[in-house]
Amino acid sequence: MDRKSFIKKAALGATASAITLTGCKEVISNPGASSKETDYSKKYKWNMVTTWPPNFPILGEGCNKFAEWVDQMSGGRLKIRVYGGGELIPALEAFDAVSSGTAQIGHGSAYYWAGKIPAAQFFASVPFGMNAQQVNAWIQSGGGMELWRELYAPFNLIPFLAGNTNAQMGGWFNKEINSLDDIKGLKMRIPGLGGRVIERAGGSAILSAGGEIYTNLERGVIDATEWIGPFHDYKMGFHEIAKYYYSPGWHEAGTALEVFINSGIYQSLPYDLQAILEAACARLNLYMMTELEVKNAEYLAIMREEGVDIRTFPTEVLDALKALTAEVIQEMTDKDPKSAKVYASFKAFKAMDKDWSNLTERVFYNAIS
Ligand code: CA
């Protein structure tokens, strides 16, 4: 749009513009949907399988709220029953269950499916990647969503952005991390690409479900662990058994969470229920980000009061991990064309946003700190 028509359009008023934008969005997010008569008497009962322990604070609870919102917005026409990991199926089988239509809808994070779709990891977290605001911008408005939907399409799934952990912490250690040498031989519980980076640094990355981490750390099965942030980590009690709590979560600076819906089932829904699901995903995304921001700040203060030894990784350690990350991603994109395609978009967006965020966010953060 040139400047003249932009001004003309702006003069029509904000309301008119908003309607136009919403209209466009709907066409994009409902590909293939045709006009159909809405049967308002038809009721739907869905099962939502999640990767979180049942009623897990904020993440699992958020899914429960999602079901309530959909129920309210649909006037009770779409009822969703939420299952924690292990209740209906094991947590990490959620993707397959929704893909096959055994369950209609799921909630998790895309890096759990790295074994099937390596490129999915770009839609969860990339070490030294982007923060929550940037990840949201890239996926929702910067071209990421189209690539994500393309990636899930062969599995009969439609992904939606539906949560973000915001910045995470770097994890719990029983020794100081002063150089990359301190990571050599370290057995750390850390998922995703971050784990590959730790391995490249000479450590070993161990994956264990949430419920096992405390015992493993206490018994020395692992030497270190990352989890989420002060709120969830405090609830897990890691401060009782580990000496140091390191920042930042270089591997998860804004991990995106997802809702995935079986595409055939979604497309068979009346239009309004499709729109309600999309709106509920957007609300869930915001709910998780705001809840985590508040709770993490609150629990960081509690940890400080209780004298938890909170450190930041030395710059040289972060620089070294960043260089290893580049190697890990290079190897991945060399091997897998889909990863190469998605990473090209991720990287281009990040590069474009750098000047803008440095000029504004970075200067502002420094000014207020
Ligand atoms: Ca984590």
Image: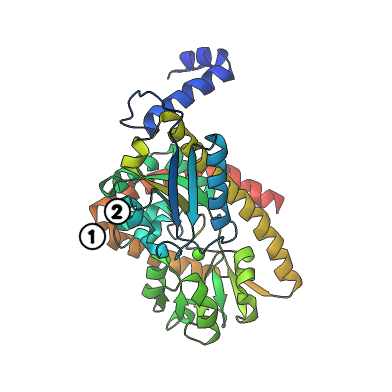
| Residue 225 seen anywhere in this rendered image of the structure | no
Left or right: residue 256 versus residue 313 is: left
Considering only vertical position in the picture, is 243 above or below 124?
A: below
Q: Residue at x 32, y 50 (%)?
A: 101
Looking at the rendered image, the quarter that the C terminus falls into is bottom right
Residue 58, given in percent of the width and then of the height, sits at 59, 56
**Amino acid tagged 2:** Ser
Q: Element type at marker 1?
A: helix
Q: Choose between 147 and 235: the one closer to the eye.
A: 235
Q: Is mark 2 within 8 Å of ligand 1?
A: no
Number of marks: 2
Q: Element type at marker 2?
A: helix
Considering only vertical position in the picture, is 184 above or below 76?
A: below
Q: Choose between 287 and 303: the one closer to the eye.
A: 287
**Amino acid tagged 1:** Lys
Residue 273 location, quadrant: top left
Q: Residue at x 31, y 48 (%)?
A: 152
Q: Residues within 10 Å of mark 1 (few under 14, many from 20)?
A: few
Q: Residue at x 51, y 78 (%)?
A: 224
Residue 199 location, quadrant: bottom left
Q: Disc 1 vs disc 2: Cβ atoms closer than 8 Å?
A: yes
Q: Give the residue pinned by disc 2.
A: 339
Q: Give the residue pinned by disc 1.
A: 335
Residue 135, given in percent of the width and then of the height, sits at 47, 48
Q: Residue at x 47, y 63 (%)?
A: 251
Left or right: residue 90 versus residue 68 is: left
Per the model, the C-alpha gap separating discs 1 and 2 is: 8 Å
Residue 91, given in percent of the width and then of the height, sits at 42, 63
| Residue 266 seen anywhere in this rendered image of the structure | yes
Left or right: residue 332 versus residue 29 is: left
Considering only vertical position in the picture, is 242 above or below 136?
A: below
